[in-house]
Amino acid sequence: MTILLPQTRGSAGRAPRLDIDLGAVAHNTRLLASRASGELMAVVKADGFGHGALDVARTALAHGATRLGVTSLEEAWALVDADLGVPVLSWLNPVDADFATATARGVEVAVPSLPHLAAVAAAPGRTRIHLHVDAGMARDGAEPASWALLCRTARRAEQRGEVEVVGVMGHLGCAADPADDCNALARTRFVWALEHARAAGLRPRDRHLAATAATLTDPRSHHTMSRVGAGLVGIDPSGTTSLRPAMTLTAPVVSVRRVRAGTPVGYGHAHRTSRATHLALVPLGYADGLPRAAAGCAEVLVHGVRRPVVGLLSMDQLVVDLADRGVDLGETVTVFGPGDQGEPTVAEWAAWAGTIEHDVVTGIGARIARRVRGVPHLRSLS
Ligand SMILES: *Cc1c(COP(=O)(O)O)cnc(C)c1O
């Protein structure tokens, strides 16, 4: 067996690395802003879908977004600390969440039920709230049967100065399939919810239903604002629009071995080589967020050529079949990227694993070094 000596390549990092391209986020934000009829809220929950909440927030605000949204209050604090100068909405909290601090720090909160309303109204100060209606997916938001009462109760709390109802929100369950009848039903239910709010005396400035897919495909759902998350980082659940993926994952080859035909590879000997070949070891596995379910389908880019990942993915490592071609130790392998150089995309990894792109990008592990490119010019947001 020939041992190939590593070549020194200056600053080319040897460790696995996740590159975040904020230029892609900027591009996607501009495209989404041009499609939205109303304002654009940048949803940066789950650390900006794994891309860095503050980096995505700043980029989106510099390129057309005017608002920020997250799920928990804990996620909101980091945005408030950064003092980005725009309202922040948090929409998924238990009834005993720290609404007093939310009010004190100016965070707007979604209210999906009477118990939540009572908790928010009891907090000192006047909290800005968005009443959240379930538009038909039996998940978050008030059930239609309780909506009228929620609106009336919120109006009374508003008159007492305990809350200010600045918004009404809903969410679409089937927007990824624009042809699904469920979208029309949800739109109708949302308009019905707005009418009830108005009848109760509420005058919500923000009325928002659409996320990325509906922003791109269904103007009738736009109302005064769109809440977009996936689209900012290049994911279009509707599959109708070409957005720019913002993540590239690379790793060095740790070792290369030449093996005979019939060599079993990895745990459970789940793969046997069909011919004599070279196998490269890459130090990335399911602990780094690569879905184990992609085994048997996954590929990576080596020297500009797609090569199959063989055997099961381990926690920390995977094996690539290089065929008759050796590589230098330390050679960089591209696991996924925007696809411009022929590398696999996150969408392909998701398909190989039977999941969606969101699942892959939000799962990339903390031990991978990150490099952020295209840091946006900070415009004044005061
Ligand atoms: C995550 C989320 C969004 C953003 O959805 P995308 O499809 O990622 O744009 C919008 N609204 C709510 C309530 C969400 O939870």
Image (cartoon, rainbow, N blue to C red):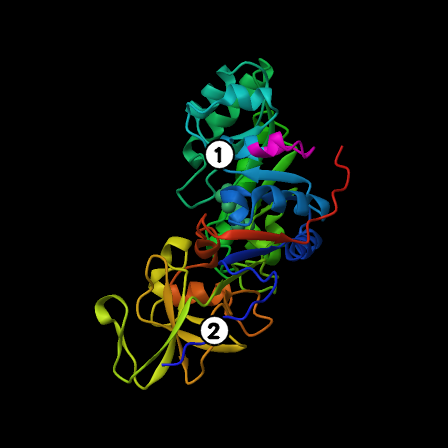
Up-down relation of residue 9 to residue 150 (above or below): below
**Mark 2–mark 1 distance (CA, rounded to whole Å):** 50 Å
Residue 72: which disc? 1
Which label was assigned to residue 5? 2
Q: Quadrant of residue 115?
A: top left
Q: Amino acid at mark 1?
A: Ser
Q: Is residue 84 magenta?
A: yes
Near-viewer residue (81 or 86): 81
Q: Is residue 83 left or right of residue 168?
A: right
Q: Amino acid at mark 2?
A: Leu
| In-front residue for pair 363/63 | 363
Give coordinates of residue 168: x percent, y percent. Answer: 57, 35
- Going from N to C along the chain, the mark reached first, 2 or 1, is 2
- Give yes or no for residue 270 being in the magenta stretch: no
Residue 377: give x, y in percent of width and height: 75, 46
Specify few, some or many for label 1: CA neighbours under 10 Å numbering under 14, 14-19, or 20 or more: some
Q: Is residue 86 above or below residue 175?
A: above
**Residue 171 in view, yes or no:** no
Residue 83 falls left or right of residue 315? right
Q: Is residue 269 visible?
A: yes
Q: Which residues are magenta?
A: 78-88
Does the beta carbon of the residue at mark 1 sit less than 8 Å from ligand 1?
no
CB-based contact (under 8 Å), mark 2 and mark 1: no
How far across and how far down the image is residue 60, in percent?
Answer: 66, 47
